[in-house]
Image (cartoon, helix red, strand yellow):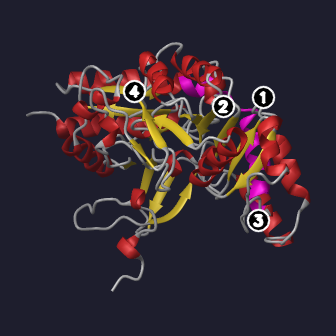
Amino acid sequence: MNHLVGGISSAGRALPDLDEQRFLVGRSHGPYLWDTRGARYLDTAMGFGATMLGHAPRAVVEAVNGMFSRMPMPSFAHEAEEAAAAALAQCTGPLSQVIFVNSGSEAVHLACRAARAATGRRRIAKFAAGYDGWYDQLAFGNANSREAGMGAGTRPERDGMLLLRYNDFQDVERLFDECPDVAAVLIEPVLANAGCLEPAPGYLKAVADCARRHGAVVILDEVLMGFRLHAGLCGHLYGVDADLAAVGKAIGSGTPVAAVVGKPWIMEVFESRRANRAGTYSGNPPVCAAVLATLAQLRTQDYPALLARGNALRERLAGIFRDAGLPFSTTGFGSVFTPWASGEPPSTYQAASEAASKEWTLGLHMALRRTGVMTMPFVFGRLYLTFAHDDAVVGELEAGFAAAAHMLAPH
């Protein structure tokens, strides 16, 4: 009898057996995983984006260990909390006020609570097929759900959560014509969990500007994309003037930490207790130490070089599969991208749904595992490259894909 339900605590960790052997991680370091039998894998899942510096970066591990030995869990305020908040605020521009929480889902939930308190309105709009957390309200309209398809003339809504068509400029205006009482628009800059679908030029700014004209708060969900394209928020690169943002994953190098960052005018709802926040583990000393050490490293990293390395790899992979007689394309960026079994990458969720193939994704995953490369085995999965994926590691990854393409090619 297994006491751990399904053998895992989060469904996203599920991996298929290979040759009737279950995969269990025994160790992780840099860009690699080792299973409990000692086999090494080049990792492209990378904590689903939570390890931008690679697994177990020394400076972060030492900072966390040192803090844990000194004060693992005091009940009261401690010196590292303000220091970590200040370090984070240095990267988020006018979003200068910080509240630490424990997960991205919690951060998005808290940001929505702030928007409701500030506006007196109840409804929140999010992108159909966007992933903004696993809480019931926020999970409405996730990729693969019936509602995410948004049939013609429909505006799905549940428990005050409305859906908005991604990359549809006209649908933003229709939203506010239909629903003038929207408290906030929740902007996930890139639909990562729907296959790394990128925003159309000017789209995100148009959404934010429209929301502001109608008195709605602008929230960036940066849990996945924050600190992935530069040492800051992805939405700021696209010209979004947000009031709030939820960040997580990359800011803590795999420790359980996330945060809400916001402009002072809206974060005042917490100061005045018009909105509540609590959490025993929120902003605990070890995760604050992780944030400080991680951000110190990220601010010195060469993001353009990483993005160029990853984009060059994407082009070479397309060539490898083309030469093997297999259609292949990718969507996303040099540091995070989704592979597709089609020559033309999708640009909308509808196109992504039509292009998605569970059988192809699983077949590619299994072939890559046999070459020593670990990937996410489900539709809309992503490959993450980190600063630990240097030229040599990327060359190793390319070789693994070439071997997998040979296995999958028609003979």
Judging by the rendered image, the residue that carries numbered circle 3 is 65
Residue 256 rendering spot, x and y as whole percentages: 64, 59
Q: CA distance from mark 2 to mark 3?
A: 28 Å
Q: CA distance from mark 3 to mark 1?
A: 30 Å
* Contact flag, marks 3 and 4 (Cβ < 8 Å): no
Q: CA distance from mark 2 to mark 4?
A: 20 Å
Query: Any magenta on residue 282?
Result: no
Q: CA distance from mark 2 to mark 1?
A: 9 Å
Label 2 vs 1, first from the N-terminus? 1
Q: CA distance from mark 4 to mark 1?
A: 28 Å
Drawn side of residue 53 relative to residue 158, left or right: right
Instruction: Identify which residue is drawn at 41% across, 66% down.
Output: 24
Judging by the rendered image, the residue that carries numbered circle 1 is 93
Q: Amino acid at mark 1?
A: Gly
Label 2 vs 3, first from the N-terminus? 3
* Contact flag, marks 2 and 3 (Cβ < 8 Å): no
Judging by the rendered image, the residue that carries numbered circle 2 is 233
* Contact flag, marks 2 and 1 (Cβ < 8 Å): yes
- Which residues fall within the magenta stretch? 286-307
Q: Secondary structure at mark 1?
A: loop
101 or 317: nearer the eye? Answer: 101
